[in-house]
Image (cartoon, rainbow, N blue to C red):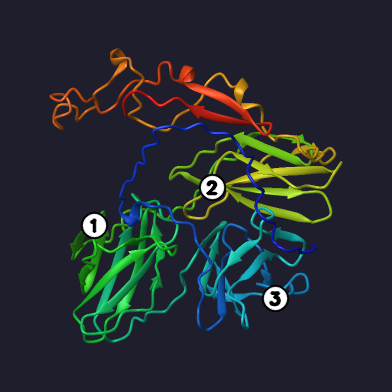
Amino acid sequence: MRSASPRRPRRPLVAFVAATGLLGLVSTTPAADLAVPLQPVADTANTATVLYYTKTKNWSSTYLHYAPDGGSWTAVPGTQMESACTDWVKNTVDLGSAAGLQATFNNGSGTWDNNGGNNYALGTGTITVKDGVIAHSDPCADTGTGDGNQATVYYSTATSGWTTANMHYAPAGGSWTTAPGVGMESACTGWWKKSLDLGTATSLKAAFNNGNGVWDNNNSADYTIPTGTTTVKDKTVATGAADPCAAEEPDTGAPTTPTKVTASATDTSIVVSWDAATDDTGVTRYQVTRTGGTTGTVVTDVGSTVHSDTGLEEKTAYTYTVKAVDAAGNTSPASVEATATTGEKAPAPAAGTPLGADPRKDPVYFVLTARFYDGDSSDNRGGSQHTKSGNAANNDPMFRGDFKGLVEKLEVRPRSATPQLRTRTPKSL
């Protein structure tokens, strides 16, 4: 398989949007509730320790094929990764002056995980790649179970839905771990576990994160955790707790096989879809395996029941199978095959030709505002806080109108052959 520089994202189609009376809506959400994508993070050491999750791939060997930012790719298949701990392999890369690397993974025999053709953009430090998800974590960190005081911490991600959990902590009187802390191990569905040797300390301070900059630090107060077994769930700490996974049998059951797999081609893209699989604990994602073309076998992790495969070779037959994966890493048997043949690459639009339709032909214009006054009080609405806020007493509804007559307030004025959308000033805002 040949490697190329990572693909640049395609530019989205440019669309006309007519907006008047724009009201900015700003909300503050706790950090733990946000899904923050990973950005490459610079590290003064300029090394990257990459850990790759192998349970769902079931490869006998794993290779890291990479290129430091601005540098050359390793020779195919790359560098063989070594065992790190159960279900994980690792490799440490010296990046020189680079601040990150592009990476793909393979089994040394032509089966690749290249992040759906986009490669994995990794930074520095310790990084995990698990079923297509990147995080800063070390699931194989050894925190010791020596002769000191012991603390076993269970952390619940059932509400947050995190796919990785780190514990950043400091024993009482001691120093904090280096952020993001130590990786926790999956204990059972929705629970992560870490056992710590605290030495002579009898408690610790802790915060948790998903390895991508999303934190649960107990509303900036951190969690105080004693020795023994403790559970932390939805900001509630239970000390001297029972093992939340003790009564749960290990999940060894695989999901059902995805059915009704179809593949349809348009130009050099293929869309694959299938019916959802089922599992006693829930399906978390799917593995789509593609064969065909000159790039070998490619495995892509997908979070839905539709996969769009783009940038394929022209007039080439591709075959797809799908497996379902649950939270414990159990995989279903592969589905029946679905095959589609690509056509020719779509021609580029002629110079000067608009990519979209003439906005003057659109029947509806959307305006992003909740308080546009259209002059018709009959369609004003109050909202749940209408009376409590005092708006009702002042005849000032929280939501003014449903944009009735708004299209009549818009006009199109040509200028230099480019349509210009304008609005007449409303009577009141």
**Could you tell me if residue 337 is visible in this image?**
no
**Distance Cα–Cα, label 2 vs label 3:** 28 Å
Identify the residue at horizontal 34%, vertical 23% (top origin): 427
Residue appearing at x 65%, y 47% in the figure: 11
Total labels drawn: 3
Q: Is residue 252 above or below residue 377?
A: below
Precedes in sequence: disc 3 or disc 1: 3
Callout 2 amino acid: Arg
* Cα gap from disc 1 to disc 2, whole angstroms: 27 Å
Label 3: how many residues lie within 10 Å, few (<14), some (14-19) or many (20+)?
some
Percent coordinates x, y for residue 83 in the rendering? 58, 75
Give the image quarter of residue 181: bottom left
Question: Which amino acid type is marked by label 3?
Answer: Thr
Question: Which tag, 1 or 2, sits closer to the chain's start?
Answer: 1
Q: Could you tell me the amino acid type at mark 1?
A: Lys
Q: Please name the residue that numbered disc 3 is placed on.
A: 79
- The mark found on residue 235 in the picture is 1
Q: Is residue 27 left or right of residue 311?
A: left
Q: Secondary structure at mark 3?
A: strand
Q: Is residue 312 left or right of residue 383?
A: right
Q: Is residue 50 above or below residue 374?
A: below
What residue sits right under mark 2 in the picture? 285
Left or right of residue 221, residue 348 in this image: right
Residue 333, given in percent of the width and then of the height, sits at 63, 46
Image quadrant occupied by the N terminus: bottom right
